[in-house]
Image (cartoon, rainbow, N blue to C red):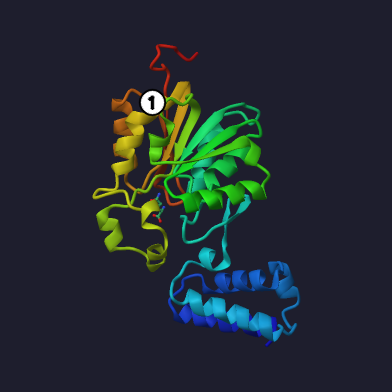
Amino acid sequence: MTRAALLAAGRDALARAGIGEAKEEAERILENVLKASKAALFLDAAKEVAPEAERHFLRIVEERKTRKPLAYLLGEACFGEEILEVSDRCLIPRPETEILVEALAKQLAPEREFSFLDLGTGSGAIAIALMRKFPLSKGTLSDISEEALGIARRNLGRYGLENRALLKRGDLFGAFAGEEPWDVVVSNPPYLSEGDFRNLQPELAFEPRLALDGGTDGFDFYRRIIPEARRYLKPGGFLALEAGAGQADQVSKWLQGAGYDNILRFKDYLGFDRVVMARINEGLNGKTYH
Ligand code: GLN
């Protein structure tokens, strides 16, 4: 079959299975199978695809019809400017999480030297994007899942960042008793509620529940992170959290109640307050930030 015919067959099969962006996905699959750019797919649309590659393409299309996310089938996902390894042992990085990175980029100069902790790092997406935006930053990446940390480690390796990063396994701050405080604590914690799980997109069922499940009302992790993070932040330090759609009010209230200042919110592409950021002006040891 020619490239054009194969793309059309893939697109139609995906569309029949109810996949919204069938054309784009068929293109991404063929790009990945042929290791060719999108431009090349179209320039050489009449070129015959070798039988082995054709089988490979159709195998991925078949599997995608089960609603397994494309990122897992291809083993990689785009996050901002990065292409990261992913597997079904970690959450697939989402475009809205880029807002968390951008929110910090609005507060900190690119040449700023700082330390950060990424709680529940998963594939390492947030930490890697931060380290690439801030060449003088140093990151601690933690996750409760050893397998996720393995993926994060390989992603750090892809970008030559291992020597600026420390990986630690643990349940939120559980891994860090007596540790030096950080300048920034950042997290995209699991935040889906029980109700959200009843209306899941089929793709979400393939992702680790551990990375999505925020308890009955979805807020379990904010209840723990907000009070605890104070002890792990330097005076003047930032706590930056992604929040689920409709959760930002509650998260802001808790931040205020716990003594954080300068609470800021950032909207996602759909207009939801997606990121809440706050500052600790006075450290627990009484030191004040100026
Ligand atoms: N943004 C994800 C979703 O709704 C949830 C990620 C999370 O729980 N942090 O698909």
Q: Is residue 210 above or below residue 256?
A: below
Q: Is residue 239 above or below residue 40?
A: above
Between 110 and 85, the one nearer to me in the picture: 85
Between 169 and 83, the one nearer to me in the picture: 169
Q: Quadrant of the N terminus?
A: bottom right
Q: Name which residue lies at 49% across and 34% down.
A: 117
- Residue 206 figure quarter: bottom left
Where is residue 150? Give x, y as percent: 54, 51
**What amino acid is found at the position of numbered circle 1 in the picture?**
Arg
Tally the numbered discs.
Answer: 1
Where is residue 12? Give x, y as percent: 52, 82
Between 6 and 67, the one nearer to me in the picture: 67
Q: Is residue 190 left or right of residue 39?
A: left
Where is residue 205? Give x, y as percent: 37, 64
Q: Is residue 85 left or right of residue 176?
A: right
* Mark 1 CB near ligand 1 (8 Å cut): no
Where is residue 24? Give x, y as percent: 57, 70
In this figure, which residue is indicated by the disc labeled 1?
A: 230
Q: Is residue 131 left or right of residue 37?
A: left
Q: Is residue 88 above or below residue 211?
A: below
Q: Name which residue lies at 67% across and 83% down.
A: 52
- Residue 198 figure quarter: bottom left
Between 45 and 159, the one nearer to me in the picture: 159
| Residue 11 visible in the current orientation | yes
Q: Is disc 1 surrounded by few (<14), some (14 to 19) or many (20+) residues within 10 Å?
A: many
| Residue 261 visible in the current orientation | no
Q: Name which residue lies at 43% across and 32% down.
A: 176
Asked which secondary structure carries label 1, the reply is: helix
Q: Name which residue lies at 63% across and 34% down.
A: 134
